[in-house]
Every structure is written in structure tokens, then in C-alpha cells.
Amino acid sequence: MKIEIAGQNAFIVYFADQTSAAVSAKIQAAVDNILTNMADCIVDLVPSYASLLVIFDLDRSDPFAMRQRLRVALAELDSVDGGAGDLVTLPVYYSLESGPDLEVIAERGNLSVEAVIDIHQQQEYRVYAIGFAPGFAYLGEVDERISAPRLATPRQKVPRGAVAIADRQTAVYPAVSPGGWNLIGLCPTRMFDPASDPSMPVKVGDRIRFSAIERARFLELGGEL
Amino acid sequence: MSGFTVTQPGLLSLLHDRGRYGAHKLGLTTGGPLDFIAFDWANRLLGNHVNATCLEISFGGLQLQADIDTSLVITGATASCKLNGDNIQQWHTRDIKKGDELEIGFASAGTRVYLAVTGGFAITPSFGSSSTVLREKIGGLNGDKLQAGDYLPCTPAQLSKHCYLPLRERPVYGDQATLRVVSGYQQSAFNALQQWRFFNSEYQLTDRCDRMGFRLEGESVHSEVVGMLSEGICLGAIQIPADGQPIVLMNDRQTIGGYPKIGSVIVEDTPRLAQLSPGFHVNFEAISIEQAHNIHCLAHARFQRSTPLPC
């Protein structure tokens, strides 16, 4: 673990060179510990794949005290098992209608469309990071057999709820936006809803499973085609 | 309800408090005033709470009609400001009455003008803040910039004593700036020659400068980083993509990103960058984290010590 300067009021903690479920769990434990013990001087935290950005209040602390307190908070983690993370199941309507790139992924992997859908559901994913847009959760890791590079030309408009794959990551688009990921289905669960509390069904460190639903159920759950 | 009607919205007028904090975990950015120094002065001159909601008027062109008796102040970039057609001075508090017309012309020095009213604009916060972030459609009035016909609600309250900030205490908005940088992030992946080039070259602001980031053009700089994991980005972080041209990330930056960064412009200097226009120049000066901390403490003390004078 390395604590590096990010800026005048921020440190970035690197937990590892690569991401993994264990690294992700450790970062989540660090977030909890810092929010519990250092709330007086923390402005915001940004957990990501293998790092944690710690932004502090320049008027309530200084870089020297902060680095020291961070060291203590992180040292305590060695004796703590990273939290298992909550398990969240997201329903998905997989079909050629809702997942225009299913066939391309099937062809790439020499698989049937059904096999692609099965493989996507078999894995338990971790929320490694949230960013790009409000509520956009990066989930890993996708089985190599169904991984696929980003589209050469991103789509102008990806629908809200689109379940997508890029390399070994998968995600659900929280809102209509441009996007270059491969679309395999639609999820009726709102990934970001400012009017709800909590506004997101998942957080960094959670475990995610996808579960296939029929078209009728998708519509019943509020999905739109 | 009382307040102001927007008759001309200007190019980009946004409601902001000091910014949205604690919501990075949802992927929400900070927002907040690009020039927090001018913003803080606007609230302080009126005796407002430090987090009161003001208007950030980028490049000017705003016209409002008052439907309220209140006091206001205009700070930030220099622009011709008129009340019912008569010039009024910036950095001076003054009263405004129901029916008055306020006009803020286009900025002649600097780019961001701030307008505060007594008590601040009454905007329902989203995720703890009224700051408008267009990309996220959050904050302000329905997450949007001001439109003609919008109504800006606030509570009537006139000051009993008016004041102004003397000229010597005000920021100067020029056409270049030296931005102080704390080295950090992937700094060690930039070799000595690349760092020398970066800190000894002049960069020009391109026309791709917005609330997310300021793209600069000049001597190209390269790192040895190949493919990195996305990580959290702080205000002022200097991202250097493959083309070697730096981007200084500002208030509406994405919260995570995967480009190498050589360090970060200190918080005190991002407002100076924000007040520059495309075509203007900056250069970067490396300072230690200790110096950066001293600069912050001195700036804080100076703000506390500076006293507005009675009108």
C-alpha cells in the first residue's frame, strides 16, 4: 500500500497494481474506517479499482497530520477482513430485441446467444468503481469467453438500463447517453434516481448477480422498450 | 414568493453554492463556483452564509427584473453593470427595488461574474447542494442553465449599511497566469526531461475550455505510463493524454479517469485559470506540499483580515 500526494488537499492511496475482489473489499473497508475515524476533516472520497482518493479540508487539517492519520487508519485494516459486500441481484431482459450486440459477442466466442446469456449470469461481479456518469457502476470481471472490445464507433444513444460489456467489465447504463459498450440486454432497475433514497441500488464493493427475466416481467417492473 | 425574473439569460449563467461534497461515491462531481474567491467575496460583502447560492455568469449578457426589495453585489470579472440604465459599480453592495432592471454586460477582463443577493437565492438542494452541473442535470433550476423567463426566488432583506471592497484587495484579471503545481499522482512516470519541458514552457488556452476542464496547447509532454486503472481525480489535476497536451481538470470534472497526471494546480490558483480566455497563456511552477499549505494559510488569513469599507 502506498500513500501518494494527489494535490494540495488530496492524497491517493494505491492498494495494489491490479484490481481483484480482495483489493476491492479492502478499499471498501478503508472507506468505512476513514469515514468513521476521520470524518472531521474529510471532504470526499473516491474509491476506484485499486486506489482511494482522499480529499481533505485544508481549513481543518494539513497534509502532514492527514498523512499520519491515514497511515494509522490503513494500518488498522491489516487486522480487518475486507467486508464481503452486499449481494445485489439485478434482473435483465436478455434478447436480440434488447441486446443488439448479443450475436456479435456470440460469434466472437464461438458460442450460442443462449450460452452468452448464461455465462453473463454465472459470474458474481464486484462493483469496482462508480463514475463516468452519475450511477454508472463498473463491474468486474466478465468471463473471458464473452469479453468484447468497445465498439469502433460509439452509439449516439444508448438507452437507460442497457446492460453492456466492454473488455472484461460489465455495467448498466443509468441514463440515456452516448456509449461504446456492447449491449446485451436491458435492466428495469433504476441505477440512479435522484428522487429515491438511496439513489443507487449498489455501492462500490458490493457483489452483483444478474438474473434473466422475460419480456412481460421486464415491462411489469417498469422497463421500457 | 418574491425574487427575480430572467429577461436575458446570458451565455451560461448557473446557480451555485460552494459545491457538492460527499456524493463522489454516486459518481457526482463537485460543481461549485469556478472562481471561489470572487464568489466568497460576494457572499461576505452581503453578510451571507459562506454557502449561500449565487449566480455564476460566464462571459456576461444577463438581464434580470427585480420583483423584490433586496440588496445585491456583483463581483468577479469586470463587466459593465447597469441598474435601470445607470452604471453601477462592482464589488459595492447596493439596494434594488421591485421593478428595477439589472443588466450585466459582457466581461471585459476575466470571464466569470458573480451576483449575490441578501440571503442567497432560495434553491432546493440536490444531494446537499444547489450547484448546477449541466452534464449531470442536477442542481439549480431543474439541472439547467438559466433560461429567459426563469424565476429566481429569494427573500426580501435590505442591508442597513452598505460597503465595498477597496480596489487593492480585489483580484486582478489579466491575460496570463503562473499556476502553482504540487507534483503528485503519476509524476514519477514523467522523466526529468519531460518535467523540465512541462515546467519551463508556456501553454495557451484552447477554445476547448469549460467547467469540466481546460485544454491547453504547447510543448508536448510524455510519460512512460501505458494503460492505467481509472482512479479518483481531484480539483486542478493535470491530466496528460497520449497527445502530450495538458488538460487541467476543473469543478465539473468526471470523478474518475485513466489518463496519467503530473500533479495538480493548487486550489488557490484554479480561479485564476478559470478567469482566463482562450488564447491567453499560462505556465506552471512546481512547489512543495509544504509551500502549498503555507499559500493556503496565507490566503485564508488574508481573506479574514481584508475588511470591506463602508460606502
Image (spheres, coloured by chain):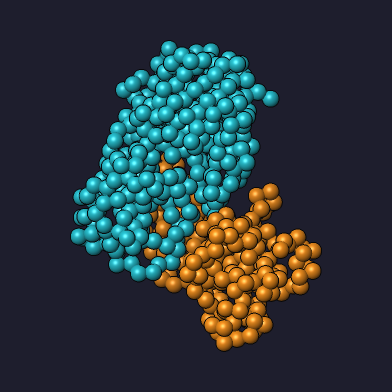
Q: Position of residue B303 (x, y in %)?
A: 39, 29
Q: Position of residue B223 (x, y in %)?
A: 29, 63
User: What residue sits 39% from the left and 48% below the top?
Assistant: B208
Image quadrant where residue B87 sits: top left
User: What residue sits 41% from the left and 58% below the top?
Assistant: A12
Between A13 and A126, the one lying in front of the other is A126
* Quadrant showing the N terminus of chain A: bottom left
Between A70 and B108, the one lying in front of the other is B108
Q: Position of residue B226 (x, y in %)?
A: 35, 69
Image quadrant where residue A164 sits: bottom right
Q: How many marks?
A: 0
Q: Is residue B111 above or below residue A102?
A: above
Chain A display color: orange
Q: Is residue B252 above or below residue B83?
A: below
Left or right of B121 in this view: B171: left
Chain B display color: cyan
Q: Position of residue B84 (x, y in %)?
A: 51, 15
User: What residue sits 48% from the left and 54% below the top?
Assistant: B254
Left or right of B88 in this view: B121: right
**Hey, which residue is sitting farthest bottom in the picture?**
A110
Left or right of B91 in this view: A91: right
Between A3 and B33, the one lying in front of the other is B33
* Quadrant showing the C terminus of chain A: bottom right
Image quadrant where residue B172 sits: top left
Can residue A36 be seen at all in this image of the molecule?
A: no
